Structure formats: C-alpha cells, structure tokens
Image (cartoon, rainbow, N blue to C red):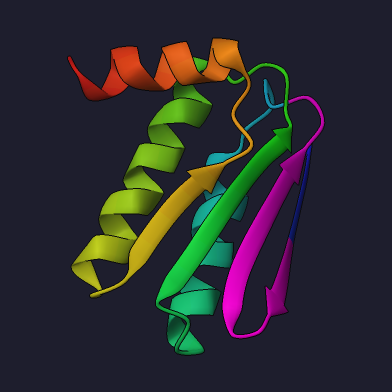
C-alpha cells in the first residue's frame, strides 16, 4: 500500500494505491493531520487505484472524514469502483 499527497490549485489530494489489506490507519491519519495543520481544509481521498478495502481501512477513512469535519474542513472520496461504493454505503448506513 502506498499513500501520497499532492496539492493542486489549493486542493489537497491523498492518493492511495496498492494492497490496502495492510494497515492504512496510522499513515492516513498522519497525512490528514499534516494537511490540516498546513491549513488545507478541503481534502480529497483518491481510491482510483484501490481494488479492495478491508473493513479496517474503510473505518479509517470514515475516521478521517470525522477528523476533517471536526476541524472545520471537508473530505471527499473519489475513484470508488462499484465494489468499494457498495462497501461505503453499507458502512455509512449501519
């Protein structure tokens, strides 16, 4: 699994790729915190290159969303394939 961030026209994007069965949480939370500390309140998590996300990884993205909202920001998730969309809907509607 790999996490990279980039800033384009003031928009912070976190690109996640690879096997997300490994722990996503700590690295994602550190990246989110760094971006928020730098004043980036609009953050995109790009999952375009992720084919599978386990429940722990999904929970970490939901946690990241909550963290950003508490700090007055917005977090958007993009690049979801159909399987990931279904996983998100199930998690968010529980």
Query: Is 14 located above or below residue 53 in the figure?
Result: below
Tell me the quadrant of the picture where the N terminus can be found.
top right
User: Is residue 44 located in the magenta-colored stretch of the structure?
Assistant: no
Picture coordinates of residue 28, whole percent (x, y): 57, 52
Q: Is residue 55 left or right of residue 74?
A: right
Tell me the quadrant of the picture where the C terminus can be found.
top left
Q: Residue at x 44, y 72 (%)?
A: 42
Picture coordinates of residue 72, whole percent (x, y): 23, 75
Q: Residue at x 71, y 51 (%)?
A: 15
Q: Quadrant of residue 47?
A: top right
Q: Is residue 13 left or right of residue 73?
A: right
Picture coordinates of residue 83, whole percent (x, y): 57, 10
Q: Residue at x 19, y 18 (%)?
A: 93
Q: Residue at x 62, y 53 (%)?
A: 27
Q: Is residue 75 left or right of residue 43?
A: left
Q: Is residue 55 left or right of residue 21?
A: left
Query: Is 11 located above or below residue 78 in the figure?
Result: below
Residue at the bottom extreme? 38
**Residue toward you, 9 or 63:** 9
Specify start and end residues of the magenta stretch as a single range: 5-19
Q: Majority secondary structure of the magenta segment?
A: strand
User: Is residue 11 located in the magenta-colored stretch of the structure?
Assistant: yes
Count of numbered marks: 0
Query: Is 86 located above or below residue 47 in the figure?
Result: above
**Residue toward you, 8 or 69:** 8
């Amino acid at each position: 699994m790999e996490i990279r961030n980039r800033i384009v026209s003031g928009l912070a994007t976190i690109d996640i790729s690879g096997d997300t069965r490994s722990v996503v949480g700590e690295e994602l939370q550190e990246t989110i915190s760094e971006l928020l500390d730098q004043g980036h309140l609009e953050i995109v998590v790009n999952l375009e290159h992720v084919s599978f996300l386990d429940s722990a990884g999904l929970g970490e993205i939901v946690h990241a969303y909550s963290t950003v909202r508490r700090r007055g920001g917005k977090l958007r998730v993009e690049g979801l394939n159909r399987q990931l969309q279904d996983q998100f809907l199930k998690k968010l509607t529980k």
